[in-house]
Image (cartoon, helix red, strand yellow):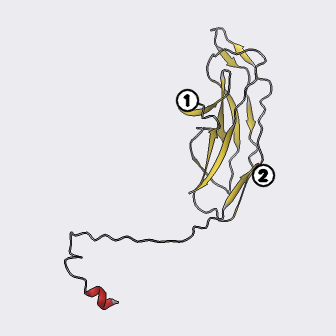
Amino acid sequence: MLLFCALIPPGIAATGKQFKMNINISGTVVANGSCTFNQGGTITVNFGQVIIQKSSDSTYQLEGNYEQVLASDINCTGDTAGLLQLRFTSATGNYTTVANKKVMGVDKGPVGIELLVNDSVQSMDEWWALDQDSPPVLKARLVKLNDDSFSSGDTFNASGTLTMAFN
């Protein structure tokens, strides 16, 4: 083998010249890491009765703090080494920006839902790092978006997906 390599014509391997070849590699990627949230079930968040008051300047404000912990027990098994990331996305793709953060829109009404990760606002639909040895506390909080029309007794709905990636 060494003798063969030494006999390559000098014109092929000369400085400044390119030599191209196709290399095909085949195999199987084995990834056996997996995680489940809330034992794989659906998480339902009920904010209860939401009170919106008209202020003296004819705008509307949320009366109180509407914040709920998301039951998001994270259980990972197998090969989970590397960068773990999470992203919460709206099922409808409906977002509004509030204070430079994406907030998930609801089907009707003047409110949106923001995601809190360890009590810090996290933009929806953006990846963020997760330390599986110290899982974060996830919360959903209602925020006032605008003064769209709404009626007393209205209900609103929103749904989304929490996704994890191993990078």
The kind of residue on which mark 2 rests is Gln
Q: Is residue 69 left or right of residue 29?
A: right
Mark 2, other Cα within 10 Å: few <14 / some 14–19 / many ≥20: few
The kind of residue on which mark 1 rests is Ala
Res 144 → quadrant: top right
Q: Is residue 153 left or right of residue 111?
A: right
Q: Is residue 167 above or below residue 151?
A: below
- Which residue is labeled 2 in the image? 39
The residue sitting at 30% across, 88% down in the picture is: 4
Viewer-closest of 135 and 43: 43
| C-alpha distance separating marks 1 and 2 | 33 Å
Element class at badge 1: loop
The residue sitting at 40% across, 71% down in the picture is: 23
Residue 34 in picture, x, y percent from top left: 68, 59
- Which residue is labeled 1 in the image? 99
Quadrant where the C terminus is found in the figure: bottom right
Q: Is residue 119 above or below residue 14?
A: above
